[in-house]
Image (tube, coloured by chain):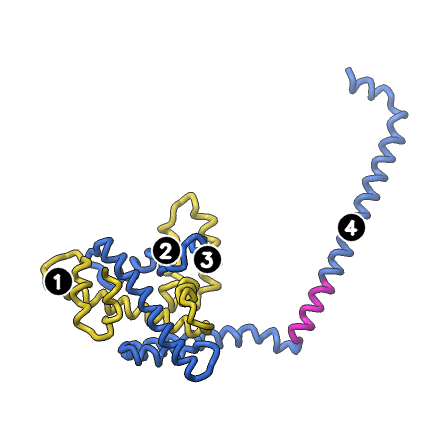
Chain colours: A yellow, B blue
Amino acid sequence: MAGVEEMESQTDDKENSSEKIVKTKEKNSNQDSEKLMKLPLSRIKSIMKSDPDVTLASQEAVITIAKATELFIWELSKDAVHSTLQSKRKTLQRKDLDCILDTRDCYLFLEGTLD
Amino acid sequence: MSTENKDEDELSIPRAALNKMIKELIPNIRVANDARELILNCCTEFIHLVSSEANEICNKQSKKTISPEHIIAALDHLGFGNYKEDAEAVLEETKAVAAKKRRGSSRLENLGIPEEELLRQQQELFAKAKQEQALLEQQQWLQTQQALQQQQLQLPQQPDSNEDDYS
């Protein structure tokens, strides 16, 4: 629970006492998924459901997609940073993301997103 | 929450979560705001893409609910097969944690009392507690009444002290 305490010390003092209690409680109940998940499952589920064709998805399916999304972010960022460093910059910019789209077939679906 | 005000089309993963992840991944690189925005949009597209594909796979199998296996097959089809291992690992961890939880709570069941019976007992206890509370309140009311009566009886015997009170 050390990680929980570290996070709590960063919250505002005025909200500290009540937030501590709420955060601890929430963390205890979501502890298992929070330890594993960096993205909120409810939001991911909402995004999935916004597609009218998509029917029901099990909780485990949402967890699987959540993890895949984390990995996607990781890969995207990693690839983009290569471009940043090659250009001898310290700030990752949109053009770095533009650059890497051609580098992997799996990024083809993002073509429209960049407009 | 604010998601209720957002159009479904504007849904994306929370910026704070993304920022935290990026910071962990590439702590020494700054990321432009519009680049962050773009990554967010890419994630949303990714989720749509995978859900869509998984949905098709699910339908082909004549199943009604998308299962993790459908998601993993979708990732494979879409060229994200390298995510399979980690995705499956997380799933296993989640199952293990859930199983642990069940074992923990089954201690109750080991008493030999099924949930329905426990519920019934709980209702009984509530009813009992209510009765006792009512009795207690009744007694207190009686005591208060008695005390009041005694006060009223005492009043006429001490007229002097009453006058003192008013002076």
Q: Amino acid at mark 3?
A: Thr
Mark 2 belongs to which subunit? A
Q: Main secondary structure of the magenta part?
A: helix
- Label 1: few (<14), some (14–19) or many (≥20) C-alpha neighbours in 10 Å: some
Depth-wise, is mark 1 or mark 3 nearer the camera?
Answer: 1
Q: Is residue B117 magenta?
A: yes
CB-based contact (under 8 Å), mark 2 and mark 1: no
At x 26%, y 70%, the residue is A109
Q: Which residue is mark 1?
A: A85
Q: Residue B106, position in %: x, y? A: 57, 76
A60 lies above or below A47 = below
Mark 2: which amino acid? Met
Query: Dot 3 corresponds to which residue?
Result: A24
Q: Is residue A34 visible?
A: no
Give how far apart the Cα atoms at labels 4 and 3 are. Answer: 37 Å
Q: CA distance from mark 3 to mark 2?
A: 11 Å
Any mark on residue A35, and which?
A: none
Q: Residues within 10 Å of mark 4 (few under 14, many from 20)?
A: few
Q: Earlier in the sequence, mark 3 or mark 2?
A: 2
Name the N-terminal-most of marks 1 and 3.
3
Residue A7, which numbered label?
A: 2
Residue that mark 4 sits on:
B136
Callout in the foreground (2, 1) = 1
**Magenta stretch bounds:** B114-125
**Residue A59 is one of the magenta-drawn residues:** no
Compared to A13, does A80 lie above or below? below
Chain identifier of the residue bearing label 4 in the image:
B
Q: How many marks?
A: 4
Q: Is residue A58 visible?
A: yes
Which corner quadrant of the image does residue B115 belong to?
Answer: bottom right
The answer to whether B45 appears left or right of A98 in the picture is: right
**For the residue labelled by badge 2, is the local secondary structure a helix, a strand or a loop?**
helix
